Image (cartoon, rainbow, N blue to C red):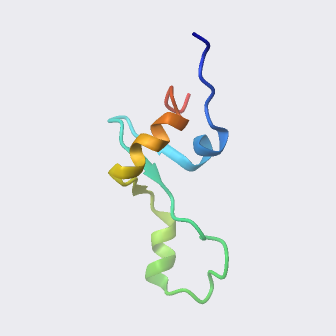
């Protein structure tokens, strides 16, 4: 059985924690940011937990984690 390839776009967009949780950043963080409220701008700096429904899709894109 051949090795599976890691999806390079997913590798850059997601972060896997030591406990196995998949973290994501919010999209649209660089476009028209000045007029957004400070609370929203702060949210862009944080990493958010990926929803359970998307977790299986991302795990297929990253078969070996982020190595």
- Between residue 66 and residue 57, name the one nearer to us: 57
Left or right, 19 with respect to 3, comes to left
| Residue 11 visible within the image | yes
At horizontal 45% and vertical 71% (from top left) the residue drawn is 43
Q: Name above or below for residue 2 compared with residue 45.
A: above
Q: Residue at x 62, y 80 (%)?
A: 33
Residue 38 lies, in percent from the top left, at 48, 83
Residue 55 placement: quadrant: top left
Instruction: Decide if residue 33 is on the left or right side of residue 17.
Output: right
* Quadrant showing the N terminus: top right
In the image: residue 40, left or right of residue 6: left
Q: Residue at x 36, y 36 (%)?
A: 20
Seen as rendered, the residue at the extreme front is 1
- Seen in the image, is 16 located left or right of residue 19? right
Q: Position of residue 62 (x, y in %)?
A: 53, 34
Q: Quadrant of residue 47?
A: bottom left
Quadrant position of the C terminus in the picture: top right
Q: Position of residue 10 (x, y in %)?
A: 59, 44
Q: Nearer the viewer, residue 39 or 13?
A: 13
- Outermost residue on the bottom side: it is 35
User: For the image shown, how many numbered marks are present on the structure?
Assistant: 0
Residue under the point 60% across and 16% down: 3
Residue 16 in view of the camera: no
Choose between 4 and 26: the one closer to the eye: 4
Against 38, is 46 above or below?
Answer: above
Question: Residue 19 in the image: x percent, y percent?
Answer: 32, 36
């Amino acid at each position: 059985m051949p090795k599976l390839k890691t999806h390079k776009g997913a590798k850059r967009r997601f972060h896997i924690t030591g406990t196995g949780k998949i973290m994501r950043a919010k999209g649209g963080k660089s476009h028209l940011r000045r007029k957004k409220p400070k609370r929203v701008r702060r949210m862009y700096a944080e990493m958010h937990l990926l929803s359970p429904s998307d977790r299986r899709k991302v795990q297929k894109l990253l078969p070996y984690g982020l190595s």
